[in-house]
Image (tube, rainbow, N blue to C red):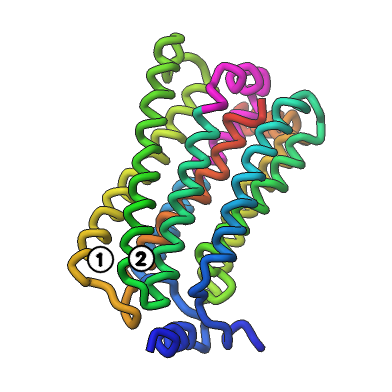
Amino acid sequence: MTKHDKTPSTSLVPLTLTWLVLCILTVLSLGLGQWFHAAAWLPLLVAVIVWVKGTLVARYFIESELAHPFIRRLLMGFIAFAPLWLILTGFYGGQFAQWGSLFLKH
Amino acid sequence: MAAEAVLELGREENMGGRIPGNKGMWVGITCEFVEFAVLFIVYFVARANFPDAFQQGAERLSRVSGTVITLLMLTSSFFIACSVNTMRAGKRRQSIYWLVAGLLVALGYPIAKYLEISSNLAQGINGESGIFFTVYYYLTFNHLVHATWGILGILWVLVRHLFGGYSVEDHHGLEALASYWHATDIIWLIIFPMFYVLA
C-alpha cells in the first residue's frame, strides 16, 4: 500500500498515544534540563526531543504523510530548523559569535 | 456513508497528496513559520553572543508556567485533532464536544501567560532586564498573539459547527483551523526548551 492509498484516520487511539508520549517527553525534557543543566551534551538531547515532538505532532495530528509534498517538506524543514541551530550554537556558539563580530567590524 | 466520505477525502488530490484544510490556511502557516524562523535566528545569534545572560536568565523564569503552557497547548491540540477525526467518522455531536474541550483548554494559555508575566513583573523582570528577557518577551508575546488568533478561529469554527456548517463530506474549515492550531503548537514546542529547559 503506497502512502497515496492511505486514508485520513477516524480513530482516536493513535491520537491518544501520541498525546501521552508528547506529555511524557515534555516532563522528561524538563527533568533533564534540571538534572544535567551543566552537561555539554544537553543541547544535543534537547534538540532531539524537540525534533521528535514536532515530528509526532506533524505526523499524527496534521497527518503530514498524507499531505501534499510542499506541506510535508515545509513541516519537516521547520521542525528540523531550530534543533539544528540548537546543536550548532550549543557546540560552536563561540565561533558563531566571533564570525558575527567580524561582520560587525566591517 | 462516513467511510466512503473518508475514502474520498483520502483520495482527493491523489497525485500530489491531500491538503489538510485549504490552501489559504497553508499560505498563512508558511508565513507564520517564516516569521518565527527569523525570530529564532535572532534568538540563536543573541545566545551565541551572550551565553552567560541566557544561562542566568533562564534560571529566573518559572519552569512551572512554561510546562503548564506546553501541556495546555498539547492537550488542546489533541482535543481538536479528536474533533476532526470524530467528524470524519460522522459523529457530529462528539466532534462539537471535542472542539469545546479544545477551546476551554486553549483558553488556559492566555491565563497561564498572564499569571507568568504578573509573577515576572513582581520580581522586576521586564523587557529591559537584559538581552535574554528582551528576546524572551518578544518571542513569547508573538506566540501569544498567534495563539489568540487561533482561539478566535476556534470560536468561529465552533459557531459554524453548532449551526451545522460542517459535514462528513465537507469539513475543510474545521481541518484548516486544526492545522493552524497544530502549527502554533509546534512553534511553542520549539520555544519551550529555548527559555525553560536550557538554563
> Percent from the top left, x then y, of residue B198?
66, 30
Residue at screen point 46% across, 53% down: B77
**In which chain is the residue bearing label 1?**
B
The residue where tag 1 is placed is B161
| Callout 1 secondary element | helix
Q: Give above or below for B8 relative to B196.
A: below
Residue at screen point 38% across, 18% down: B118
The residue where tag 2 is placed is B95
Question: Which image quarter: residue B109?
Answer: top left
Residue at screen point 44% across, 59% down: B30
The tally of labels here is: 2
Packing grade of label 1 (10 A; few <14, some 14-19, many >=20) is many
Question: Which image quarter: residue A80?
Answer: bottom right
- What amino acid is at disc 1? His
- What amino acid is at disc 2? Ser
> Percent from the top left, x then y, of residue B196?
59, 29
Residue placed most toward the observer, B37 or A16: A16
The magenta region covers: B38-64
Sequence-first disc among 2 and 1: 2
| Callout 2 secondary element | helix
Residue placed most toward the observer, B127 or B60: B60
Look at discs 2 and 1 and give the one toward the viewer: 2
Judge from the rendering whether residue A57 lies leftward or rightward of residue B31; answer left or right. right
Distance between the Cα atoms at labels 2 and 1? Answer: 9 Å
